[in-house]
Image: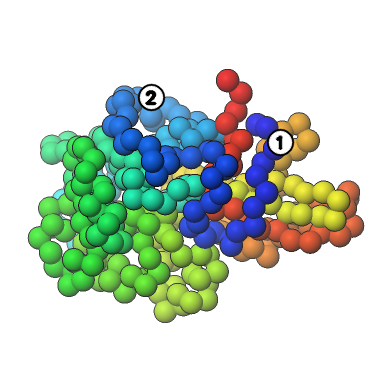
Amino acid sequence: MTTNLPNFHLSPFKYHSIQPHFNFSIASSNSQIIKPKKIPPSISIQCNLSSPPKSKEEAIRQAKTCLSSTLEKPLNNLKLTAGKLKKLKQPRFRVEIPVNDDSPDSLSQLALQVFDEMPIKRKGSKVKILILWPNSTLTEAANRVAFGSVEHVDISSLKDGGNRVLSSADVAVFLTPEASQMEVMETITNSLYPKPVVIFNPRWSYEDEENILGDFVDFLGSFEVIYSFMGLEVRGLLSKRNGVVFKCVRDGVLSGERWSVLVEEEEGELKVVSRFKTRPSINEVENVLYNLMAINSPITKSAKFLKGLVSNVTGKK
């Protein structure tokens, strides 16, 4: 890990397009979309899920491994496939990978890297993934890319929740959904029962989720966060500290994983300074970092979450 982390002030947990020099990127808007080499399932499953990612590739690999292993159990559940729906809980998951570019080409590349050829073991037919995009521009961009068993559709075309494309999918993914689409998302999710549904990189901020989206708090709360990586920064009068908030479900088992707050040491290593049972609020993280910095700086000005992958979290070659 290196020490020169970026100095940004972004809203907490907000999906955000960040500065160009923030070079820990998924893709640039001018980059050519190229289908990546297939990664054997055994390699993907063996990636390290115990600590925050040190590169763009590791972040994608972690999220893909976490999501595929978590989906494997419900997709092989006979109760789901046979229609035995006696009070069966619908699998609902949430994944957050900060990116530095939310252009259509960049998001298509991200979707390709995460959802194409997912190493999900299932007897019988191949798993069909349906990606629900927030607008037609993103849908059209995704359709220009050569996906395997992934289909794309504009969420606005499914407002009635009864489109035939839903019935053919095994997993539905709301990719970068807007806060204004919450009602139709709930309708579609209910119509997909009991099939798994995933929210991937929502565009609303965590503050919005606590305040503006209060009418949908129960709906959003039904989605288990299985992977999240969020940069953060706290400034003192004479110094500043950088770190991350991190959560990752390992081995596909939801067993009460905690949210970890890690702060960068002088040597560049990340050290866990606190853990939370639920997603920590900005105030909770501020208190942790204020207390940590009080030893060296009597005045701490602010703490901000950074919705973007850290540019220098690249590790040593």
For image coordinates 26% across by 35% down, the residue present is 117
Q: Residue at x 51, y 64 (%)?
A: 205
Any part of residue 70 in sight: no
In the picture as drawn, the residue positioned furthest to the top comes out as 317
Q: Amino acid at mark 2?
A: Ile
Kindly identify which numbered label has been placed on residue 3.
1
Say which residue appears at 68% left-offset and 65% top-offset: 283
Label 2, secondary structure: give it: helix
**How many marks are shown on the rendered structure?**
2
> In this figure, which residue is indicated by the disc labeled 2?
43
Residue 72 drawn above or below residue 96: above
Q: Seen in the image, is 23 located left or right of residue 173?
A: right
Residue 238 in the image: state x and y as whole percent. 86, 51
Amino acid type, callout 1: Thr
Residue 82, disc: none
Query: Which numbered disc, 1 or 2, marks the residue closer to the eye?
Result: 1
Relative to 274, say whether 192 is above or below: below
Instruction: Work out whether residue 169 or residue 182 is closer to the camera in this orientation and state it.
Output: 182
Residue 124, position as x, y percentages in the image? 13, 37
Q: Circle 1 — which element?
A: loop
Residue reaching furthest to the bottom: 215
Q: Looking at the image, do the residues carrying marks 1 and 2 touch, with CB atoms under 8 Å apart?
A: no
Indicate which disc, 1 or 2, sits on the residue closer to the N terminus. 1
Q: Quadrant of residue 178?
A: bottom left
